Amino acid sequence: MNVIEIKNLTKTYGKARGITNISFNVEEGEIFGFIGPNGAGKSTTIRTLLSLIYPTGGSAKIFGKDCIESAHEIAKDIGYLPSEVFYYDNMKVMDLLKYSASFYKKDCWKRIMELAEIMDLDLNKKIDDLSLGNKKKVGIVQGLLHDPKLIILDEPTSGLDPLMQQKFFELLEQVNKKGATILFSSHILSEVQRLCDRVAIIKEGQIVQVEKISILKENNHKKFKIETKEKISPAFFQLAGVNNVEAHDDTISFLFRGDINTVMRKMAEIDIVNLWIEEPDLEEIFMHYYVKEA
């Protein structure tokens, strides 16, 4: 079952670029990554999905219901953390969270206390006394206090220190194991690589690729680094699928995509001292798609 269904979603701002024909689905129970650099269209897609802004074209459904027609009904089961959070400064954290909880027909106080403890959040402080990181903690608790079925996170770790990021990731993994579906938007690729099952890559308002992270890595180049007894000319590895060949003294490195046996047979012709074969990380994959589509 798809919790989110987006089809040809488009939002234009006059002559300014928005998003064009965005299409992807998020399955129930998965953590879905939405990645692209700042300004690529991630926040516009999310805000349109949440009916905070209206689309120019296309459609979006959450829980099988139209995001515009059923926005009020859908909202009660969604937790949303925007990239930037703004609050009434004179309110205490506790009062803000109680106010947020009042929109849901359930007692959220126990969950608020649990989340505040996990995130090391002082409920008695005033909002205007909080740092950027602590305001982000308030947003996290606010988004999760009602145990939503769908959690939508837009650049959620900005302002959090590394230790708190770790706690936050562990919290997301816990709620996901309990059945929550998560849409995780970020430009920080290591976060997406750690948490997500599948990913959509967005560039200049358009989807470049939607795929499982494991398949993205399998279908991409392997990195070879070879230490040899004698200096080898880069021309030695002029094979189909080989590129980015670099030679330094007794070391040669390159990227390869294709039948690995081709490279292995070529390497059998030389005396090898050491050999490294590595998988590309998500950042290299990401840049590959951006360069390829340029």
Image: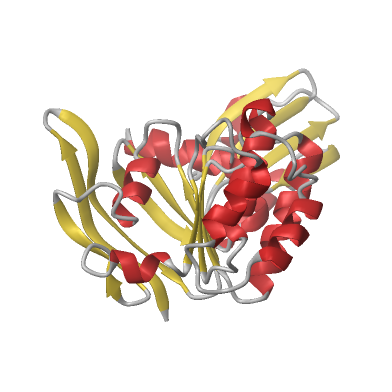
User: Dividing the image into 4 quarters, which one contains the C terminus?
Assistant: top left
Residue 57: percent from left, percent from top:
14, 54
User: Which quarter of the picture shows residue 71?
Assistant: bottom left
**Front residue (pair 26, 161):** 161
**Front residue (pair 38, 103):** 103
Determine whether 168 is above or below 283 in the image.
below
Residue occupying image coordinates x 21% and y 68%: 69
Q: Is residue 77 visible?
A: yes
Q: Is residue 55 left or right of residue 282?
A: left
For this orientation, the residue located farthest to the bottom is: 1
**Front residue (pair 256, 90):** 90
**Front residue (pair 55, 137):** 137
Residue occupying image coordinates x 23% and y 55%: 9
User: Dividing the image into 4 quarters, which one contains the N terminus?
Assistant: bottom left
Q: Is residue 252 left or right of residue 84?
A: right
Residue 282: percent from left, percent from top:
59, 45
Residue 70: percent from left, percent from top:
27, 70
Q: Is residue 181 left or right of residue 165?
A: left
Residue 37: percent from left, percent from top:
45, 33
